[in-house]
């Protein structure tokens, strides 16, 4: 009888243990998302597509989709868990402005300062935001949700997270994953669009080397840029303030250590936190919904519209510019704020058709203009819809 009691006790313990395993709590959605996470890791490691983004996100997806018994306080949506507190910085929009601080400390605005009309290219590409906004409304999303989804047209991950945290926290996981996925796929998606919308003559246009920009201009630009944009759109202050402050640290010449820290260790640490928590937020029980699928599809359309808008706007500008001042439409794609990948694609495409045609410095103008532009649009949407 004693042996029977011991066996029953062990059997109960084993049964209880099995209840807590991932195998007992797994759903088809968990396995599907784990496959997605493994695919992200494959793209980042084997294909070397934006590994700094896709590796943390991919591993985060694996972490977020380990099945567990509800109430064990390990999931990202369970108050009191470590992931819950790490996710707090994402949910409350804390991480994106700090990322913008690092971006500002990295960015060189020289190309934009030397050729201000390139700012128009970055503005034209924001059409993707409004296209996504209108499509989202047609699919039945609310105005606030549509505004949060719309910012996907900028292909700016931090801005997408920031706006979603304010307007549609429930959709932030899907919006963030979409934004960073399309940022990573810039070298795949943009070249076919660029080939389709440009002629052989367009691709061979050579632009004048940008003029030298003085240190004084570089110091003045972030101060003036900050005052103008934030007086115009005060709601964009968290992003624009940090962006221009980071750039001022870089250009003023007396805070080099602070600029290096902001653009290096701080940005790297935040990239890990954002990628990991963003990936973990794709917990199958919460993430796999019809809305997530719609958001991913709308993001693809908006990204294509933004890329095409930048290219076609350059072609229109060239109708009014004299020979020698024309802009190569291959930098129109750089109006998408996927810094610096869209500019690299412009450079690679330019060299593909003419080995002496270096477009990188020119393409940086629309790219940094779009970074500013997307933050301004985010502020506008937040002001109207927040």
Image: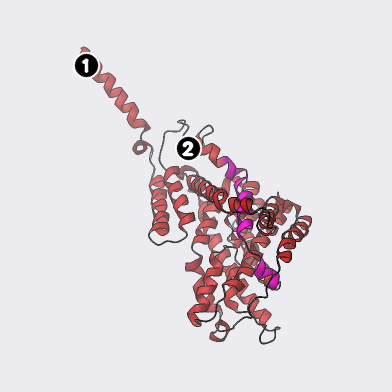
Q: How many marks?
A: 2
Binning the other alpha carbons within 10 Å of mark 1 as few (below 14), some (14 to 19) or many (20 upward) gives few
The quadrant in which residue 23 appears is: top left
Could you say where residue 371 lies in the image, as x and y percent from the top left? 64, 61
Residue that badge 2 annotates: 75
| Distance CA(mark 1)–CA(mark 2) | 38 Å
Secondary structure of the residue carrying tag 1 is: helix
Whether residue 72 sits left or right of residue 214 in the image: it is left
Which residue has dot 1 on it?
Answer: 4
Q: Is residue 82 left or right of residue 67?
A: right
As helix, strand or loop, the secondary structure at mark 2 comes to loop
Q: Residue at x 65, y 48 (%)?
A: 167
- Residue 141 visible? The answer is no
Is most of the magenta stretch helix, strand or loop?
Answer: helix
Residue at x-position 62% and y-position 43% = 92
Looking at the picture, tell me which residue is in the foreground, 253 or 239. 253
Q: Is residue 288 left or right of residue 334?
A: left
* Res 252 seen here: yes
The magenta span reads 88-116
Residue visible at 62% across and 45% down in the picture = 94
Scheme by which the image is coloured: secondary structure
């Amino acid at each position: 009888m004693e042996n029977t009691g011991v066996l029953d006790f062990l059997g109960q313990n084993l049964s209880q243990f099995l209840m807590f395993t991932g195998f007992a709590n797994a759903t088809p959605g968990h396995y599907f998302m784990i496959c997605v996470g493994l695919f992200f890791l494959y793209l980042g490691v084997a294909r070397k597509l934006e590994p700094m983004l896709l590796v943390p996100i991919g591993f985060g997806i694996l972490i977020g989709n380990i099945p567990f018994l509800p109430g064990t306080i390990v999931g990202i949506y369970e108050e009191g868990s470590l992931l819950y507190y790490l996710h707090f910085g994402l949910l409350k929009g804390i991480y994106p402005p700090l990322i913008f601080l690092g971006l500002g400390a990295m960015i060189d605005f020289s190309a934009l300062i030397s050729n201000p009309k390139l700012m128009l290219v970055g503005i034209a590409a924001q059409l993707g935001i409004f296209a996504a906004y209108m499509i989202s409304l047609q699919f039945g999303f609310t105005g606030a949700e549509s505004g949060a989804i719309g910012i996907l047209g900028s292909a700016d991950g931090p801005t997408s997270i920031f706006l979603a945290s304010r307007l549609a926290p429930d959709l932030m996981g899907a919006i963030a994953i979409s934004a960073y996925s399309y940022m990573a796929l810039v070298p795949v998606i943009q070249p076919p669009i660029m080939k389709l919308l440009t002629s052989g003559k367009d691709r061979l246009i050579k632009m004048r080397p940008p003029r030298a920009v003085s240190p004084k201009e570089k110091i003045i630009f972030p101060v003036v840029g900050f005052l103008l944009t934030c007086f115009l759109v005060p709601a964009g202050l968290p992003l624009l303030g940090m962006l221009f402050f980071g750039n001022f640290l870089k250009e003023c010449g007396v805070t080099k250590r602070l600029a290096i820290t902001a653009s290096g260790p701080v940005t790297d640490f935040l990239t890990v936190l954002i990628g990991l928590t963003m990936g973990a937020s794709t917990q199958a029980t919460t993430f796999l919904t019809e809305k997530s699928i719609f958001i991913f599809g709308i993001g693809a359309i908006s990204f294509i519209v933004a890329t095409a808008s930048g290219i076609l706007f350059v072609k229109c500008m060239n109708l009014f510019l004299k020979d020698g001042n024309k802009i190569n439409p291959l930098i129109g794609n750089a109006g998408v704020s996927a810094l610096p990948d869209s500019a690299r694609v412009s450079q690679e495409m330019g060299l593909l058709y003419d080995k002496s045609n270096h477009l990188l410095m020119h393409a940086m103008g629309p790219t940094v203009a779009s970074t500013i532009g997307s933050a301004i649009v985010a502020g506008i949407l937040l002001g109207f819809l927040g």
